[in-house]
Image (tube, rainbow, N blue to C red):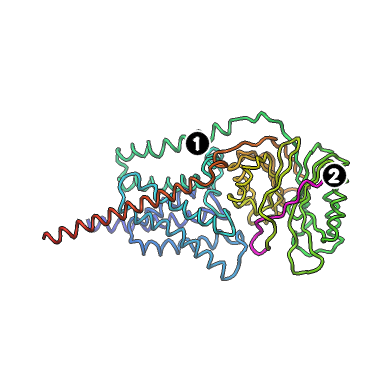
Amino acid sequence: MQNSSKTKIHSSYFYFLLGFIFLFFFNGRWILPIAAFIAPIFLIRFLRFHKPIKGLLFLVIAGLVSNIFIWKDMIPISGLFYYILMLMMSIFTSLTFIIDRIYSERLKGIVSTFVFPSVYVIMEFITVSTNPSGSYGMLAHTQSSLPFLQLISITGIWGVTFVILWTASVINWLWDNAFNKHVLRQSLWVYAVPVLIILLYGQIRLAQQTTEGTVRIASIHIPIDEQWHIYSDYPDSINEQLNRSFLDNCHIAALSRAKLVFGAEGIINVNSDEEGEYIERAKAIAIQDSIYIGLPMLVYPINTSQAPPMNKITWISPEGEILFTYCKAKPTPGEGSYGDGIIRYFDSPYGRIGSAICFDMDFPSFIHQVHSMHIDIMTVPGNDCKEISPYHTYVASFRAIEQGFHLVRAASWGLSASFTNKGQVLSSQNYYASNDAILYSDVPMKGQSTVYSVVGDIFAWLCILFFISISIFVLISANRKRIKKCQQCKIQ
């Protein structure tokens, strides 16, 4: 028996090694969707044979080492603080595994498999609610299977995270019970059937065809040979050339039957005393070509060089009227604070059109406000870098599935793309692989309400409720055992 126990402990280090290897593809720069399912299986297995403190130490080290590599340049932080952040991320994630390790000893039956995914969802929910980076880096964003991702329209990203980690938990529960027929039968009905229903729902939702017409939307990008960055300090002559190029491309897009035209984040750079004049020039183009024009601008204050530029988009109607001006509400950490946090929209013959800017789309709770606005199409100027592309554009597409709007995201230095409200790609253009200045997208004109847009984060709250309830049950059971043991001692 002792030899058998030692063999299992030795084997556990092999499980740890497998889990550690898959952590490098679990998230971040080398994402493999299947790795998000596999890594937790072996890490949980490893923990089954070790005390929680020892297991926590191993997991924290494994998480720290992998995090340092997979998030390099994808998180805009350097120096000592980067390594501290990677350590904190590893600790928080490792604690979810340790909680599962402790509860698995105290709970019997398939109900124990709900602990790990619930705790992980809670950890991510707290992170998204408090983290200045929003949902960036959350586990659901590692997945690309559209039938599976339709679950987001009901539960938000929390349901996807839950299923990924529930899979690992169920496999370990089966493993603990030597895959006997009874537990296999239980897992079939409790796990396999619900997952099959989720995938079937996804396939049916994707198969539904929209009966509405489409509108051609043109998004304008920085040409590949214009090697500049939106926060670079270029001479006014260069900025004027680029600003003029944007309006020229608006006219070209109109000739190609585009009805709405906008650009990548900060594609227009003007001083505050020049903003009005530039808007008048854009109005003339809008009237001349009978198009809607969205002007993504960085407006620099002329009285101080220390204040950050205003990052905003102004929409102009075919009649030359200003429809709204929206300022970026969720600046990238370090950018400063801009807007009032209220998304703007306008009604058009092509549906209700709204806008957010780049990083705004990383915050599910912020974008959730569009439900009450009944927005059909979101136009999103963005600015990425090679390290976070195409990841960041696909993060934005999750908001479209959640809320039921169609999405066009124009990204300088990244992947520009348009998506249906089911996450299907309509068109795309890689900044690093194309010389085209304009991306055309024929976008459905009518959005669709979703369950998630109505109920919000209720799934995450159900996970919280479950964990609190099961914790109370575990504490009561442990207390009863302690009392019973004390009574037996007294009798003896």
Label 1, residues with CA under 10 Å away: few <14, some 14-19, many ≥20: some
Amino acid at circle 1: Leu
Magenta stretch: helix, strand or loop mostly: loop
Q: Which residues are magenta?
A: 320-335
Q: Is residue 403 left or right of residue 257?
A: left
Residue at image point 45% right, 38% down = 195
Amino acid type, callout 2: Gly
x and y percentages locating residue 406 in the rendered image: 66, 40
Q: Residue 105's x, y, as percent? A: 31, 54
- Quarter holding the C terminus is bottom left
259 over 173 or under it: above or below: above
Mark 1 sits on what residue?
199
x and y, in percent, of residue 93 in the image = 46, 58
Q: Write down the residue under mark 2.
A: 320
Residue at disc 1, secondary structure = helix
SS type, badge 2: loop
